[in-house]
Amino acid sequence: MTAELRVVAIADADSFVKWSASLLDAIPNDIQRHMLLVRTPLTVSRDQERMALAGTRFGESSVTRVGFDEMAGWLQGHLPDVVVLAGRGHFVRLIARVIDRLAHRPVIVSGLPGMSIPALRGALEYRRESDLMVLHSHREIRAFEALGDRIVMPVPLALATLPYARTVLAGGATSAGASRRGRADAVGSGLADRQDDSGGGVLVAERERRGTDLVFAAQALVPAERHEREQLVDILRRAAAARPNRRVVVKLRSRPGEAETHLERDAYAELLANRPANLVLSYEPMALALSRAEGLVTVSSTAAVEAIARGVPVIALDTFGVEKPLLNTVFSGSGLFGGADDVIRRRFRHPNADWMYDNYFHPAGESDWWTRTQELVQLRRGGALPAKIVPTGRGGALKAAWHRKSVLGSEDRSVAGSVALGIGAPLVNGILGMRRARGRAGEDTWADATTDYTLEPTPHKDSVRR
């Protein structure tokens, strides 16, 4: 590349802001980076923005907040070479329609902000007009390739190191670049560590731990049912009671009144309104929480990858099972699964090295997304990369108005949007309900344990509208 590349991330929700900022932060210095935060019901607050951008080269001067209708003018004025669309599927599709109207068309890169097993049909469909879709493990690449083949929807895929897997491990080696053997040594180097009797991961000896907090990474989607979340809260209370001189930290993603990527029901702040003094709620960045952690507990949060990268041991809680709807099949073969008693007794684990290689801890040299992106820029500049235009599809103007209103919420003040939402919402809910009813078991469903993808709509109650 002879000219400095201009790269812009367009995002709204917290997890996508953090992901895209970290992704672009890893690119060499000879590019111009900027982030557009589009106003939607999910847009990060100022506090969430600061936490999401902490540790990156994105400062106040490199972030601009815009309304949706201002975005085209901003892009026309700045002429980026690459746009990273960082949002949920409906958001990506809506922004892609704006890019379709630009005279100077950038290369469109999209991706997902965390662990993406199982691969979801909707995740691929809403990003099919991307010039490149970024994934973060060899396993994810295989899953989305198989999904694309299954539904005849080829989308160019590229590998990146998950931003939270790049942290330096003990001994100075980077987690993404270490060899399999070196990585195993780095995360399981304590002399008193021992192999789990079940043949799983490496259990961590008490005297080898540096921090003292048990950090629980809360999630909006899983577990889904209130009684399950109450059961999880009971486990945390018992863990706090077992070690009254050590903290149990419930790491939350948003404060009351703030939005986050997924819609949370039965919030832990509510369920833990009355709690012992050593069971605390935290809104600090995950990196700071992990700096004081003895170990991390989660059902399926990407925070597990961040913990592993920092040498912090993990328990992937299997109390509610191991299945696709819990988003925890990604940990199969890791050796990280543990139950309530393991949490209470703080029997944390380090993962198996072979699992790490296939899941997020590949050598840095195998990540090809930025090389592929630069090649696409050259093709686009030479006129050899045709645009992938978002099709109008069935429903025409009414569906387009519904789509815009669903993503923008109160930011869309059009009469057409309100009318379309009133008509379209019941229809969409009915269609999704019929699809779920048809596919509760069988091949390529959420119940199919033989694949790393699913063709069914998500079972989680997580509407894009807020």
Image (cartoon, rainbow, N blue to C red):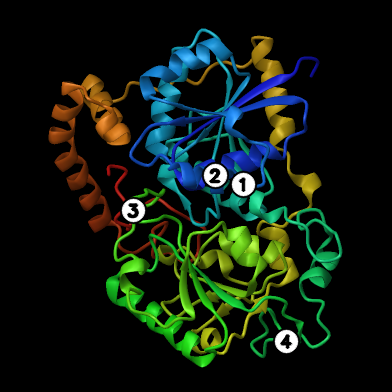
**Kind of element beneath mark 4:** loop
Q: Position of residue 461 (x, y in %)?
A: 29, 56
Q: Which residue is mark 2?
A: 50
Q: Which residue is mark 4?
A: 205
Q: Nearer the viewer's eye, disc 4 or disc 1?
A: 1
Q: Position of residue 293 (x, y in %)?
A: 63, 72
Spatial CA distance of label 3 from label 2 is: 21 Å
Q: Quadrant of the N terminus?
A: top right
Which of disc 1 and disc 4 is earlier in sequence?
A: 1
Q: Quadrant of the C terminus?
A: top left
Which of disc 1 and disc 3 is earlier in sequence?
A: 1
Q: Toward which corner of the image does residue 226 lie, by quadrant?
A: bottom left
Front-most of 22 and 121? 22
x 47%, y 90%: residue: 241
**Kind of element beneath mark 3:** loop
Q: Position of residue 192 (x, y in %)?
A: 79, 88
The amino acid pointed to by label 4 is Ala
The amino acid pointed to by label 3 is Leu
x 27%, y 35%: residue: 409
The amino acid pointed to by label 1 is Ala
In this rendering, the answer to whether 466 lies above or below 391 is: below
Q: Nearer the viewer's eye, disc 4 or disc 2?
A: 2
Which of disc 4 and disc 3 is earlier in sequence?
A: 4
The amino acid pointed to by label 2 is Arg
Crowding near pointer 1: few (<14 within 10 Å), some, many (20+)?
some
Where residue 54 is drawn, which disc sits there? 1
Q: Give the residue furthest to the front.
A: 277
Q: Which residue is mark 3?
A: 263
